[in-house]
Image (cartoon, rainbow, N blue to C red):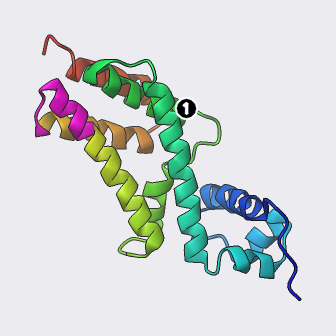
């Protein structure tokens, strides 16, 4: 008779995998490493996540929830599209300055698995598309055009890839781009 998994075992496994995936990359981490880090058996891991792709998709869903929660908090007091754009870029600037920052989990996954169209890749692409759509929407509310949205998105991409020391420059640049005097 199969044992019932302990409550929270799925979250324990996912948390362990998320740490490994973010630090080392999804491709570099084997399921045996996840078993060891989670302190669980192989059968329990595969009961919750039948494949590495399913575990990677769950990891990206977890990261998305965390990113959305952080963005929502940053936008909590922002009023109007100008302040919201600045707050969003400021939140990313804060993220890239955190100790242990190793890049955007979504962009990292798509770089590791270039050209793949599996469930995790679709999740990563959907997050990036939704984030870009939010920038486009706010720029539209501001009365800006596609070029302005492209410029802000380029700054966002640069923030994720560039050195943390340039985070303030990125925020200042967005402030300048969305300034009412422009």
Task: Say which of 152 and 62 sits in front.
Answer: 62
- In the rendered structure, the answer to whether residue 173 lies left or right of residue 42 reads left
- In the rendered structure, the answer to whether residue 65 lies left or right of residue 110 reads right
Say if residue 29 shows up in the picture. yes
Judged from this view, the residue extending furthest toward the bottom is 1
Judged from this view, the residue extending furthest toward the top is 181
Number of numbered discs visible in the structure rendering? 1
Residue at horizontal 29%, vertical 45%? 132
Residue at horizontal 58%, vertical 60%? 59
Residue 5: give x, y in percent of width and height. 83, 71
Residue 23: give x, y in percent of width and height. 64, 55
- Residue 132, compared with residue 86, is above or below; it is below
Residue 37's quadrant in the figure?
Answer: bottom right
Residue 86's quadrant in the figure?
Answer: top left
> In the rendered view of the protein, which quadrant contains the N terminus?
bottom right
- In the rendered structure, the answer to whether residue 26 lies left or right of residue 165 reads right
Instruction: Please tell me how crowded label 1 is: few (under 14), some (14-19), or many (20+) other residues with Cα within 10 Å.
Output: some
Circle 1 sits on which residue? 97
Residue at horizontal 58%, vertical 54%? 62
What's the magenta bit mostly, secondary-structure-wise? helix
Q: Secondary structure at mark 1?
A: loop
Task: Say which of 113 and 3 sits in front.
Answer: 3
- Residue 45, compared with residue 165, is above or below; it is below
- Residue 122, compared with residue 177, is above or below; it is below
> In the rendered view of the protein, which quadrant contains the C terminus?
top left
Residue at horizontal 84%, vertical 70%? 40
Magenta stretch in the rendered image: 135-146
Residue 159: give x, y in percent of width and height. 40, 37
Magenta region includes residue 79: no
Task: Say which of 11 and 173 sits in front.
Answer: 11
- Residue 175, compared with residue 154, is above or below; it is above
Say if residue 111 shows up in the picture. no
């Amino acid at each position: 008779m199969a044992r019932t998994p302990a409550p929270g075992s799925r979250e324990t496994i996912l948390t362990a995998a998320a740490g490994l995936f973010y630090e080392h990359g999804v491709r570099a981490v084997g399921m045996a490493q996840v078993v060891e880090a989670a302190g669980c058996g192989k059968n329990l891991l595969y009961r919750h996540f039948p494949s590495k792709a399913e575990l990677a998709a769950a990891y990206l869903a977890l990261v998305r929830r965390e990113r959305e929660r952080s963005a929502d908090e940053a936008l909590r007091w922002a009023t109007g599209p100008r302040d919201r754009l600045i707050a969003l870029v400021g939140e990313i600037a804060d993220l890239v300055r955190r100790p242990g920052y190793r890049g955007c989990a979504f962009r990292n996954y798509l770089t590791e698995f270039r050209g793949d169209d599996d469930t995790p890749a679709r999740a990563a692409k959907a997050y990036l598309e939704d984030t870009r759509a939010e920038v486009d929407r706010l720029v539209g509310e501001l009365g800006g055009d596609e070029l302005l949205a492209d410029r802000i998105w380029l700054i966002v991409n640069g923030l994720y890839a560039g050195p943390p020391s340039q985070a303030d420059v990125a925020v200042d640049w967005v402030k300048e781009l969305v300034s009412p005097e422009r």
